[in-house]
Image: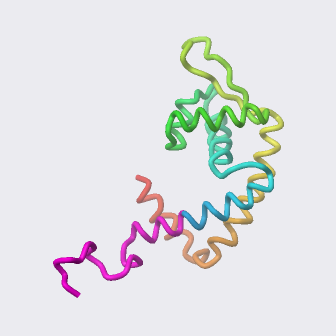
Amino acid sequence: MNTQNQVFSYIEPEENSGYLLWQVTMQWQLSMNRALGKMELTLTQFSLMAGLYWLSKKQQTVTQQQLADYANTDKMMTSKVLAVLEKKQIIERIKDPGDSRAKQLRITDKGTQALREAYHIVEQVDNVFFKNVVKDKAAFDDLLMRLIK
C-alpha cells in the first residue's frame, strides 16, 4: 500500500482509542434506549432525571442551566428534553423568583417512581453490558474518570 495515499496513521480502526470508545458508547446507548423504551423513556431523559435527583440532594433549588452544566448537555437540548418530561408529569419547571430568565426544576412523585423503575432497568443493562470487565471494574472506572477530567 502506498503510504502517501493513506489517510490514517493506523491500518485498522480498532487500533484507535477514539473509535473503540465510540463503538462501545454506541452499543451501550442502544442497549439502554431499547430497555428504557419499554417505559417510554430515553437514555437522555433518564440521565437528566438522575442528574436532577442528585443535584436536588445537594442543593435546595436546581435550574435548567445548572442541570445542563452538571450533565454536560447542550442547554437547548436539555430544555427540549425537560419539556417532554414536564408533559409526562415527571418534572415541574417553575419560574425562578430571583431571575425571570431561569427556571427551577423539581422532580415529581411520579417522576421519582419512574426514576426508581428506570434505575432497575439501567442497572440490569449495565450488569449485562459490563460483565466482561467486572473483575477490572476499579481500574476501568479509574480510566473513565481520568478521561472525564
Task: Give percent across and percent down for residue 116.
Answer: 79, 49
Task: Give percent across and percent down for residue 115.
Answer: 76, 46
Span highlighted in magenta in the image? 1-25
Q: Quadrant of residue 125?
A: bottom right
Q: Going by the image, does 8 lie left or right of 64?
A: left
* Residue name at image x 74 percent, y 65 percent: 124
Q: How is the image coloured?
A: rainbow
Task: Tell me, yes or no, whether the highlighted magenta stretch contains residue 87.
Answer: no
Task: Tell me, yes or no, whether the highlighted magenta stretch contains residue 17.
Answer: yes
State the predominant SS element of the stretch in magenta: helix
Task: Give percent across and percent down for residue 45.
Answer: 66, 45
Q: Depth check: 90 or 109 in front? A: 90
The total of numbered circles placed on residues is: 0
- Residue farthest to the bottom, as pictured: 1
- Residue farthest to the left, as pictured: 4
Q: Depth check: 137 or 84 in front? A: 84
136 over 115 or under it: above or below = below
* Residue name at image x 53 percent, y 40 percent: 70
Task: Give percent across and percent down for residue 123.
Answer: 72, 61
Q: Quadrant of the N terminus?
A: bottom left
Q: Quadrant of residue 11?
A: bottom left
* Residue name at image x 20 percent, y 77 percent: 5
Q: Depth check: 92 or 54 in front? A: 92
Q: Quadrant of residue 81?
A: top right
Q: Going by the image, does 91 lie left or right of 129?
A: right
78 over 144 or under it: above or below = above
